[in-house]
Image: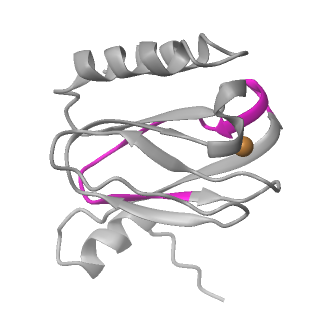
Amino acid sequence: MKKLLFPAAAIAALAVGGQALAADHQVKMLNMGADGIMVFEPGFVKAAPGDTVTFVAADASHDATAVFGPEGAELWAGAINEGLTVTLDKEGVYIYKCTPHLALGMVGVIQVGEAHNLEAAKKAAADLSATMATNKDRLGKYLEQVN
Ligand SMILES: [Cu+2]
C-alpha cells in the first residue's frame, strides 16, 4: 500500500487556496495542573487574529469568562461545567477567569497578535490579583510570557 507522506500544514494550506488556516488552541479547566490547583492549562496562549480558543471542561465546576480585553473586543461569558469556543478577531491581550475560583487565582491570559494593550492589561491584572487569596502571582507570570 502506498503511503502519502505530506505535511498536514501543507495540505491545510492547499485546502484554503494558500491562505493561513485559523488554529484552535485548547485550554483545559482543571482542579489540578502543572501550575497548581484550580487552574487553566495552558494558562497563557498566544494566538493569531481569527484563531479560536476552546475551553475544555476537563474537570467539573469551572467556567471561563473574560474580564479584560482590547478596546472594542467582544468579551465572552462561559457557563459552569460547559466547554466553550471563542473566536478572537481583535488583537491584544485578554484576561479571563473561572468565576467560582477567581479567589484561588484561577485565571488565564490570551495574547492575540500584537499586545498593544499590555500596559492596561497589567493594571487590570494587578487589580484582579489583589482580590485573590492564593496564586496572586499567577496572572503576572502569564503576562510575562506576552511578547
Ligand atoms: Cu474553576
Task: Determine the residue located farthest toward the front in the rendered image.
Answer: 131
Residue 50 magenta: yes
Question: Magenta region: which residues?
Answer: 33-54
Residue drawn at x 57%, y 50% as measured from the top left: 64
- Residue 29: horizontal and vertical position, in percent? 70, 48
Is residue 141 a member of the stretch shown in magenta? no
Q: Examine the image and state in which quarter residue 111 appears.
A: top left
On screen, residue 82 versus residue 64, left or right, reads right
**Helix, strand or loop: magenta stretch:** strand
Residue 32: image location, x then y, percent: 84, 35
Q: Is residue 58 above or below residue 66?
A: below
Whether residue 145 is visible, yes or no, is: no
Q: What residue lies at 26% left-to-right and 76% top-to-bottom?
A: 14
Residue for point 61% across, 63% down: 79
For residue 71, side relative to residue 45 (left or right): left
Query: In the figure, 99 relative to 25: above or below?
Result: above
Q: Considering the image in quadrants, where does the C terminus appear?
A: top left
Q: Residue 69 occupies which quadrant of the picture? A: top left
Q: In this orientation, which residue lies closer to the viewer: 16 or 4?
A: 16
